[in-house]
Amino acid sequence: MSPPNATPRDRLRIAIQKSGRLADPARALLASCGLSWRESRDRLFCYGETLPVDLLLVRDDDIPGLIADGVCDLGVVGRNVMTEQDGERRAAGKPTAYRELRALGFGDCRLALAVPEGWEWKSPRQLDGMRIATSYPALLSQWLADEGVSAEVVLLSGSVEIAPRLGQADAICDLVSSGATLAANQLKPVATLFESEAVLAGPVHEFDAARGELASMLLRRLDGALRIRHSKLLMFQAERASLPALLPLLPDAEAPTVMQIDGADHLALQALCHGAVTWQRLEELKRAGASGLMVLPVEGMLA
Ligand SMILES: Nc1ncnc2c1ncn2[C@@H]1O[C@H](COP(=O)(O)OP(=O)(O)OP(=O)(O)O)[C@@H](O)[C@H]1O
Ligand SMILES: O=P(O)(O)OC[C@H]1O[C@H](OP(=O)(O)OP(=O)(O)O)[C@H](O)[C@@H]1O
Ligand SMILES: [Mg+2]
């Protein structure tokens, strides 16, 4: 069932971050699915040219709500934001309104609990009666409940790491990637509450026929794009006798295509490798009997 205020549309609308960490990779990924757009003057809306798939450029925090309200059909957002807002909705007695359709492999980070470096950390029970600053109250409260800890959650919308130095909180719970921000604020991570990356989010209900077809096509293209994102096509020649030495060097390759040339023993091979094809790997293949090695980028793939 569609949300009540979803207006009938035959175009698909995807919400992405206007500016920030997820903005460029989200756009690049959708462009690699063959989408292109004409941007409005205010840079808030992009009209799909190659396909009827438009973009809405917004704050990342607004994306789950736009999907819940049926204003957008899909969104690219951090799993952290989606899950936090789902927790907040459920705490307010509202039903789940969106779900993760695909993990997108960028925007990796984790939600961690961090304490002042001088603390001797033993267990979450040390947090009993303490104040913890966070922008993720639902995820933190759930973790505290699971750990049986009774602590005060201090809600901050940003610059959470500074809260202990300002005396606003004893510990913090925030996103961590390199750990540099924690270190700069004399904090150390002691527990990971949640692992995150960017995801494609969609509604819990099915789309109507027209948008359903568009969404299915987009997901098929997206799967192809995600699969080949780090892939290379490797081409080379070898004697048949070298195959037992060569094949173990291609553990990440799909079954290679093997063609005979110049009689039965001289072969041409091509293999789609999903891992890194480094110089070192090429040199190992050469030592194992490969010649005429060529590495080609892969532009697209449809299974
Ligand atoms: N340090 C980080 N490293 C990697 N990914 C991160 C990091 N911090 C956040 N992210 C991911 O990127 C998302 C967007 O982060 P960003 O800092 O751009 O958001 P924001 O400041 O809330 O932006 P907006 O203005 O859209 O509200 C986060 O929700 C998270 O999923
Ligand atoms: O572990 P690190 O690599 O240091 O990254 C962690 C920091 O990145 C994010 O903030 P951001 O830089 O987006 O600034 P913000 O305060 O505007 O969210 C997050 O809120 C942390 O503060
Ligand atoms: Mg935000």
Image (spheres, helix red, strand yellow):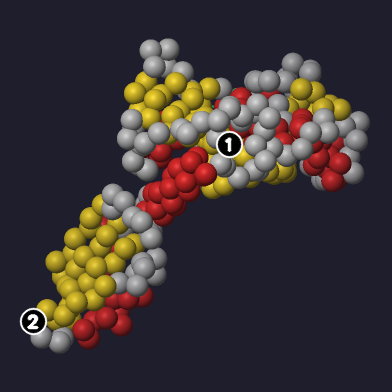
Q: Do we see residue 57 in this rendering?
A: yes
- Residue that appears at 23% across and 81% down: 242
Q: What element does badge 2 sit on? A: loop
Looking at the rendering, which quadrant does residue 227 occupy? bottom left
The quadrant in which the N terminus is found is: top right
Tell me the residue at 43%/48% (across/down).
Answer: 217
**Image location of residue 135, percent across then percent down:** 70, 26
Q: Is residue 9 shown left or right of residue 37?
A: right
Residue drawn 15% across the image and 87% down it: 264
State the residue in front, 92 or 233. 92
Q: Is residue 102 above or below residue 131?
A: below
Q: Position of residue 110 (x, y in %)?
A: 62, 40
Q: Earlier in the sequence, mark 1 or mark 2?
A: 1
Would the CB of label 2 be found within 8 Å of ligand 1? no
- Mark 2 nearby-residue class (10 Å; few <14, some 14–19, many ≥20): few
Residue type for callout 2: Asp
Distance from Cα at disc 1 to Cα at disc 2: 54 Å
Horizontal side of 138 relative to 188 (left or right) equals right
Residue under circle 1?
78
Q: Which residue is mark 2?
A: 262
Q: Please state the horizontal and vertical placement of residue 33, each as a whole percent of the image.
A: 37, 43
